Amino acid sequence: MRVSEISKRYAKALLAVAKQKGIHSQVFAELQTLVQSFAADASVKNYFENPMVSSDQKIAAVKAALSGKGVSEEVVNTLVLLAEKNRMDILSQMAVAFRDLLDIEEGVTRGVVRSAQPLTAEAQKEIEQKINKVLNKKIVLTYEQDSKLLGGVVASVGGWTFDDSIDTHLKKLNEELNRRAN
């Protein structure tokens, strides 16, 4: 997802306030939950993107929906500001920017592991340990199933690609056989 500069600015401001109060992890979790809620209900998204709905109505809706729900004051205030400026459409981008900034501060590198079949928890742990050993960083991996792979795994982490797929092994074997045949 491409993240706009304005999303980064909102995320940076929210992170600064959240870090000051020591609630940055909580704020990130709340943002994730809100993004999922907005994505799950098209009518909510349509309401906040509707130019016929005034900023005051949007602000009232945000306050009514979140008051007493355990959402931090910082997140509520940020959503009120987004509603006031008619920028609720950047919420998901802002959440991504917040995560990226938080990852930088905490030294976390994110990556995606694709496999032909779902991986067991034990296999996931083994992959994380191997990549962690090579990169010597804290990593957070997301696992996806890729029907295009014959077998094995391909991990893309922080600009690195770890390819242990059957496709790659077959290509290498083919190259080796062609070299020996010539």
Image: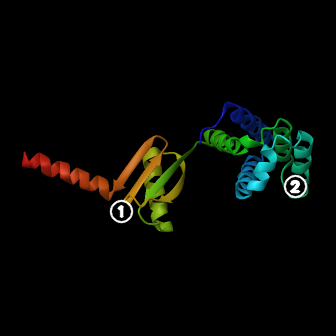
> Residue visible at 46% across and 40% down?
159
Q: Earlier in the sequence, mark 2 or mark 1?
A: 2
Image coordinates for residue 77, horizontal then vertical, percent? 86, 42
Seen in the picture, residue 158 relative to 164 is either above or below; the reply is above
What color scheme is it?
Answer: rainbow
Q: Is residue 116 left or right of residue 142?
A: left
Residue marked by disc 1: 151
Q: Nearer the viewer, residue 17 or 47?
A: 47
Image coordinates for residue 157, horizontal then vertical, percent? 48, 46
Q: Is residue 97 left or right of residue 65?
A: left
Image coordinates for residue 117, horizontal then vertical, percent? 43, 66
> Residue visible at 46% across and 45% down?
135
Image quarter (top left, top right, bottom left or bottom right) of the C terminus: top left
Residue marked by disc 2: 65
Q: How many marks?
A: 2
Amino acid identity at mark 2: Ala
Amino acid identity at mark 1: Gly
Seen in the picture, residue 174 relative to 93 is either above or below; the reply is below
> Residue visible at 91% across and 57% down?
68
Residue 102 has which mark?
none
Q: CA distance from mark 2 to mark 1?
A: 46 Å
Q: Nearer the viewer, residue 41 or 36?
A: 41
Quarter of the rendering containing residue 39: bottom right
> Residue visible at 87% across and 49% down?
62
Which of discs 2 and 1 lies nearer the camera? The answer is 2
Image quarter (top left, top right, bottom left or bottom right) of the N terminus: top right
